[in-house]
Amino acid sequence: MTSAPTLEPTQHRIDRTGTPIIRTSGVWKIFGPHAERLIGSEDAYLPRGKLREKTGCVVAVRDVALDVWPGEVFVVMGLSGSGKSTLVRTLIRLIEPTAGQIEIGGRDVTAAGAAELRELRRNSVSMVFQHFGLLAHRRVIDNVAFGLEVKGVSKAERHARAREVLELVGLEDVANQFPDQLSGGMQQRVGVARAFAGNPEVMLYDEPFSALDPLIRRDMQDEVSRLQVETGKTMVFITHDLAEALRLGDRIAIMRDGAIVQLGTPEEIVGAPADEYVQNFVRDVPRSHVLTLRWIMREPKPGEPLDGPHIDATTTIRNAVPVLAASEKDVCAVEGGKVVGLVDRVAVLNAIAAEDD
């Protein structure tokens, strides 16, 4: 088998047996005078320019409802001004929502008082921003331990935890250096380590790698994916980069003008774009790198032999090519130990040829 292609996402251990760890419904954020009066009105759905001209208001987040499951990497993406960063900041009320309900870990965030919000931000949710925000006069280990220091954790205990996390991100050798002695990628690793130090339930990433060089950015994407697999943390990741979304996300929500226009797995987004806006996003994505055998398999006919090579139905089309090339028989797509479909060479060739259409 070939190595995993660039855009093939990592499969994470997602727990859908209970309730979502993050749940939102009817979330709005409107900037401007008397914003709350717009909720439920016809004016709220006017194009942005007309709404601003008529009311002086701008709708940044428009009636968003979503669930995020424990252990999931949930990506929110869109162009600049789509509302993605505003949405993620409303989750912990760094920006106050105009309306709606937000729950994290079963707690009503929208009804939380100041003390409860502080506790949520210190212990349950950590955020990693594009700008590292490291303290230049403090060593790396003290930067990583800063959140624990704020919580009153003893120096010995917080340094021990900081060393654990620095080892997790591969920076144990620079613990006593200062931020300006590190590269941009290493500084962002320190920011990630600081977010992990408090052992939060949820990690929020607001375009954390957009200022990094492409190769460093790729390394950081790999790092985040590895950390998620090792720790099982729930992650909400904001990006404007579709390739980044496809590599990291278990599910992707695409936003436009404050609203979610499509929410689905990378395969669903690429294979069945909801509208022309999403279709333009995915136009240049090599579909065979993202779509799996589920997308092109057919049901076995009664009595049809199932003696061809057996491979997992979640295998991408691209990764199935060597198996098909080495066999004269149709590939059996397997799920849960059972053959769920058959894939022949024609189906694979048609899928690859469609990338050039």
Image (cartoon, rainbow, N blue to C red):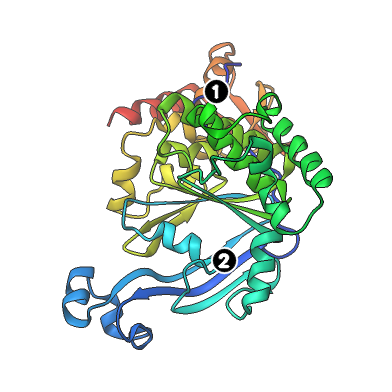
206, above or below 225, in the image = below
Residue 198 lies, in percent from the top left, at: 72, 51
Residue at disc 2, secondary structure: loop
Position of the C terminus by quadrant: top left
Residue 34 lies, in percent from the top left, at: 33, 87
Q: Is residue 293 left or right of residue 122?
A: left
Farthest top residue in view: 326
Q: Residue at x 49, y 36 (%)?
A: 291
Question: As rendered, which of 305 and 63 lies closer to the eye?
Answer: 63
Q: CA distance from mark 1 to mark 2?
A: 40 Å
Q: Is residue 126 visible?
A: yes
The amino acid type found where label 2 is placed reads Ile
Q: Residue at x 18, y 69 (%)?
A: 49
The label nearer to you, 1 versus 2, is: 2
Residue 133 lies, in percent from the top left, at: 51, 46
Q: Residue at x 22, y 82 (%)?
A: 55
Residue at disc 1, secondary structure: helix
Farthest front residue in view: 137
**Residue wearing tag 1:** 319
Position of the N terminus by quadrant: top right
Question: As rendered, which of 321 and 26 lies closer to the eye?
Answer: 26
Q: Residue at x 40, y 37 (%)?
A: 211
Question: As rendered, which of 155 and 83 lies closer to the eye?
Answer: 155
Image quarter of residue 36: bottom left
Earlier-in-chain disc, 1 versus 2: 2
Question: As rendered, which of 259 and 235 lies closer to the eye?
Answer: 235
**Residue wearing tag 2:** 92
